[in-house]
C-alpha cells in the first residue's frame, strides 16, 4: 500500500499546484487503491497523465476545466504576447534592414513596415506602463510584509534584463556587414541593430548544423543565452505576479489582454501575414519572405489563440 501511495503521489505531480491543493489528497487515496488492485494498467496510467496535462492547460487558460488560476492565466498572456512580439520584431528587422538600402517595392511590404513600426512604439509605451503597475504592486507587497517572497524573482528579473541589455553590445562586432556599415546613420539603423541581436536566435541556422557551427563562438553563446534570458524574464514575472496582490490587478490585466489582442496581436499578425503571403507569389521583388517567416506566422497565430482563450477565462475571474 505504501508503494502504491508513493506512485500515486508521483502521478499527482502531473497536475498543477492549484489542482493539487484542491483535489490532491482525495486523488492520492483513490489512485492508491486502484494501483493496489491493478498495479500494471497502462491505459489507466496514460489517462491520469493525459488528465494532468489537460488540467495544466486549463490552469493556463488554453483548455476548459474547473481550475482557474489568475497567475497562470496572466503568465500565459505574457508568454504568448512575447512570442508575437519577437516574431513581429524578427520580421520588422528584415524589413528595416532592406529599407536601409532602398524603399519597399510593394504595397504589402510598406504596409507591414509601417504597421509594425507603429505597434512597436505602442508596445514599448505599454511595457513601460505595465512596469509601473507591477512596481506599484511590488511596493504594496513589500509594505504588507511579503518582501522576502520577492527577493528571488526580482533577482531573476535583474539578471534577465541585464543579459538582454548587455547581449547586443557583446555581439556588436557580429552584425551583418550591411548593418555594421549603417552604424551612426540614424535611429532606424540603431534600432535595427538592437532588434537583430534580440532575434538572432530566430534563425534557420538551427536546421543547418554546419552553417550554425561556422558562426563565431560568442554569437553561438548569445543565440543560446538570449532565449534563456527571455524565458527567465517570464519565470521572474510569474513569481512576481504570484507574490503581489494579483487579485487587485486582475481587472487591469484582463483589459490589457483584450487591448493587446485587439491592437497589437491583430495588427501585427495581419500586417506580417499580408507581406509574408503576398511576397511568395512574386519572385522579382526585393522584400521577399522566406520559410522562416511562414513558421513565425504559424507560431504567432497559435499565440494569438492562446491570448484570446486566456483573456476570456481571466475575465470570468474578475466578473
Image: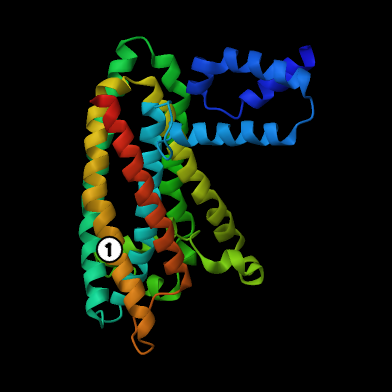
**Residue 48 image-quadrant placement:** top right
Instruction: For mark 1, give the secondary structure.
Output: helix
Q: Position of residue 236 (x, y in %)?
A: 44, 32
In the image, taking residue 152 as reference, residue 179 lies left or right, namely: left
- Give the residue furthest to the bottom: 284
Residue 225 lies, with reference to residue 57, above or below; the image says below
Tell me where residue 315 sits by quadrant: top left
Residue 100 spot, x, y in % from top left: 29, 75
Quarter of the image for residue 187 reads bottom left
Q: Which quarter of the image is occupied by the N terminus? A: top right
- In the picture as drawn, the residue positioned furthest to the front comes out as 37
Residue at (38, 71) in percent of width and height: 179
Extreme residue in the top direction: 145
Residue drawn at x 50%, y 58% is 201
Residue sitting nearer the eye, 168 or 19 = 19
- Identified at 47% across, 37% down, the residue is 57
- Examine the rendering and report whether any part of residue 194 can be seen: no
Count the marks: how many? 1
Quadrant for the C terminus in the image: top left
Q: Is residue 38 visible?
A: yes
Q: In the rendered view, tell whether residue 59 sits above or below residue 266.
A: above
Residue at 36%, 41% in the rendered image: 78
Residue highlighted by disc 1? 270
Q: How crowded is mark 1: few (under 14 residues within 10 Å), some or many (20 or more)?
A: some
Coloring applied to the structure: rainbow
Image check: 64 left or right of 262? right
Name the spot of residue 250 as percent of width and height, x first.
Answer: 27, 27
Vertical arrangement, residue 248 with respect to residue 84, above or below = above
Q: Position of residue 128 (x, y in %)?
A: 25, 40
In this picture, is 27 found above or below 171? Answer: above
Amino acid at each position: 500500500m505504501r508503494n502504491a501511495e508513493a506512485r500515486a503521489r508521483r502521478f499527482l505531480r502531473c497536475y498543477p499546484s492549484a489542482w493539487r491543493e484542491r483535489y490532491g489528497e482525495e486523488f492520492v487515496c483513490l489512485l492508491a487503491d486502484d494501483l493496489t488492485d491493478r498495479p500494471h494498467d497502462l491505459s489507466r496510467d496514460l489517462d491520469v497523465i493525459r488528465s494532468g496535462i489537460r488540467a495544466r492547460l486549463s490552469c493556463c487558460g488554453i483548455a476548459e476545466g474547473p481550475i482557474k488560476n489568475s497567475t497562470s492565466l496572466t503568465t500565459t498572456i505574457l508568454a504568448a504576447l512575447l512570442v508575437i512580439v519577437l516574431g513581429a520584431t524578427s520580421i520588422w528587422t528584415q524589413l528595416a534592414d532592406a529599407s536601409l538600402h532602398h524603399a519597399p517595392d510593394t504595397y504589402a511590404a510598406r504596409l507591414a513596415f509601417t504597421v509594425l513600426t507603429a505597434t512597436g512604439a505602442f508596445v514599448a509605451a505599454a511595457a513601460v506602463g505595465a512596469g509601473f503597475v507591477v512596481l506599484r504592486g511590488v511596493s504594496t507587497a513589500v509594505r504588507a510584509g511579503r518582501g522576502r517572497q520577492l527577493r528571488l524573482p526580482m533577482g531573476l528579473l535583474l539578471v534577465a534584463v541585464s543579459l538582454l541589455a548587455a547581449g547586443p553590445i557583446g555581439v556588436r562586432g557580429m552584425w551583418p556587414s550591411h548593418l555594421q556599415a549603417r552604424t551612426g546613420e540614424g535611429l532606424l539603423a540603431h534600432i535595427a541593430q538592437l532588434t537583430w541581436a534580440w532575434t538572432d536566435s530566430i534563425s534557420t541556422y538551427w536546421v543547418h548544423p554546419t552553417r550554425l557551427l561556422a558562426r563565431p563562438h560568442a554569437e553561438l553563446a548569445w543565440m543560446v543565452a538570449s532565449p534563456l534570458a527571455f524565458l527567465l524574464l517570464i519565470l521572474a514575472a510569474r513569481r512576481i505576479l504570484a507574490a503581489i496582490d494579483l487579485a487587485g490587478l486582475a481587472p487591469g490585466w484582463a483589459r490589457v489582454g483584450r487591448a493587446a489582442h485587439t491592437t497589437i496581436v491583430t495588427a501585427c499578425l495581419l500586417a506580417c501575414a499580408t507581406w509574408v503571403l503576398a511576397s511568395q507569389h512574386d519572385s522579382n521583388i526585393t522584400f521577399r519572405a522566406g520559410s522562416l517567416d511562414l513558421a513565425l506566422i504559424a507560431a504567432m497565430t497559435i499565440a494569438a489563440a492562446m491570448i484570446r482563450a486566456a483573456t476570456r477565462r481571466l475575465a470570468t475571474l474578475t466578473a
